[in-house]
Amino acid sequence: MDEYITLTIGKQKNIALIAHDGKKKDLMDWCDWNKKLLQKHFLCGTGTTAKMITDRTGLPVRGYNSGPLGGDQQIGSKIIEGAIDMVVFFPDPLCAQPHDPDVKALLRIANVYDIPIATNKASADFMITSFLMDEEYGHEVMNFQQSVQKRSESL
């Protein structure tokens, strides 16, 4: 069994949109500016952010729970299921967040599953304007079945 497997991100991306309260306006401005590109893809996000983006831009954004109420964990779960291909997350680096452990868990799971994640406007701009946005993309992730098998045999 191979140590890594290749997963494919399709041409139409499943993009999660998340922002802390102090950065929601920035994310809405970014979505409005990139509306033409974003409308080609499936969008989801944490509750308040999703509603605000839809209200401002008209883009359909499926809302999960608010971040402090488990929305970040829901997004992480969707990454694990293969239902989210990339994340645009504008955190507020100057304000403490009560759900900071959830945010760290989301960032960790995005890295475990090799999911592109932009955490500011510049990285989001580079990511969304990449030629890969209109292509399928194969990325390698750990073969979790093999990992579980090895762990169960060694314990």
Image: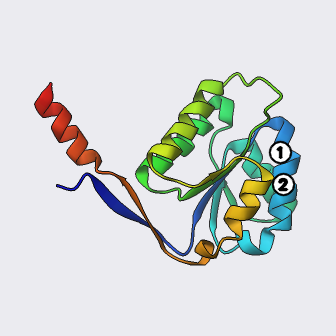
Dot 1 lies on which element?
helix
Q: Residue at x 17, y 38 (%)?
A: 150
Q: Which image quadrant for residue 92?
A: top right
Q: From the viewer's perspective, is residue 151 above or below residue 12?
A: above
User: Are there few (<14), some (14-19), or many (20+) residues within 10 Å of tag 1?
Assistant: many
Quarter of the image with the N terminus in it: bottom left
Front residue (pair 124, 11):
124
Q: Is residue 98 above or below residue 49?
A: above
Q: x, y percentage for residue 141?
A: 38, 53
Image position, residue 48 (x, y; %): 76, 43
Q: Quadrant of residue 44?
A: bottom right
The 10 Å Cα crowd at callout 2, few under 14, some 14 to 19, many 20 or more, is many
Q: Going by the image, does 143 lie left or right of 112?
A: left
Residue 96, compared with residue 43, is above or below; it is above
Residue at figure coordinates x 60%, y 78% from the top left: 134
User: Which residue is at 67% across, 35% downward?
Assistant: 67
Residue receiving disc 1: 24
Taking the image as shown, residue 52 lies to the left or right of residue 10, namely right
76 to the left or right of 17: left
Can you tell which mark lies on residue 126?
A: none
Please name the amino acid that badge 2 sits on.
Met
The answer to the question of whether label 2 and label 1 lie on touching residues, with beta carbons closer than 8 A, is: yes
The residue type indicated by label 1 comes to Lys
Please tell me the numbered disc located at residue 28: 2
**Location of residue 29 in the rendering, given as x and y in whole percent from the top left corner:** 88, 57
Query: Where's the C terminus, which quadrant?
Result: top left
74 or 10, nearer to the observer: 10
Q: Secondary structure at mark 2?
A: helix
Q: How is the image coloured?
A: rainbow
